[in-house]
Amino acid sequence: MNEVRAIHISGYDRESRDFYRTPPWVTAALLKHVSLRGPVWEPCCGDGAMASVLAERGHKVVASDIVDRGYGRAGVDFFECQRFPAGCAAMVTNPPYGEAGPEQRAMGFSRAAMPRFVRHALDLTRHANGQLALLVRLQWSAGKNAANLITSGPLDTMVVLTKRIRWFDMGPRTNNGQHHHCWLFWDFQRSNACPPRIMFSD
């Protein structure tokens, strides 16, 4: 029987519902290279780490999450959403990667969570004729299935982060970030005459 293993095992248990606070510099790196139209929806807002940076940069933000972490509108299941919130023209978020431990699997998490999320996000963005920015692992984006999914929409920009993300701080016990990440940015109003851009940022 084949054994499915994670790309990297950090030695730490996964956080409940794959919740990891996105450091402010990560969102700032995206905003260096793309311009967002209109109000922005952050559907996995957590404690507001990403939404706060967007708001500080002058964007009106609609924040929601399935879990109440003290920020935004709680109890909103992204997969039950049929359209962007009224007035929103862009979605920016750090989606759940689906690397679930026993607790998360018991709640229905699986490796299918990531492609399912991306597919639904693209469908909603297409319906809104809007923009979509997702933070993903660079290695994930190189997979065949991921590549087919990524190119199913009008990819405009890939922003590769040259600095690795540290998702938590446990003092001297904290390892350096284990993965390279990138932003994938789709724009359903982009010109097809222009190829997607690859940018590098820290």
Image (tube, rainbow, N blue to C red):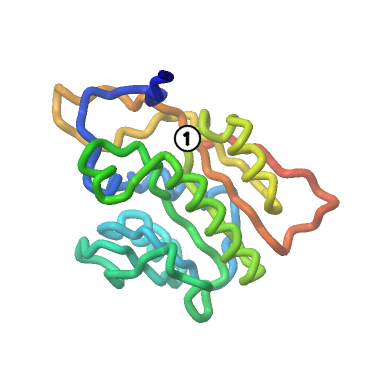
Secondary structure found at label 1: strand
Q: Is residue 17 left or right of residue 170?
A: right
Total marks placed: 1
Query: Where in the figure is residue 174, as x and y percent of width and height?
Result: 20, 25
Whether residue 202 is visible here, answered yes or no, is: no
**Depth check: 93 or 78 in front?**
78
Image quadrant assignment for residue 63: bottom left
Foreground of the two, 194 or 43: 43
Is 18 above or below relative to 164?
Answer: below
Between 68 and 148, the one lying in front of the other is 148
Q: Amino acid at mark 1?
A: Arg
- The residue shown at (33%, 44%) is 23
Q: Is residue 113 above or below residue 13?
A: below
- Residue 148 is left or right of residue 68, and the answer is right
Q: Which residue is mark 1?
A: 137
What quarter of the picture does the N terminus occupy?
top left
In this picture, residue 149 sits left or right of residue 100 = right
In this view, the residue farthest toward the right is 193
Percent coordinates x, y for residue 21 in the rendering: 29, 47
Q: Residue 200 location, x and y as percent?
A: 57, 34
Q: Residue at coordinates 36% horizontally, 66% vertically from top-left?
A: 77
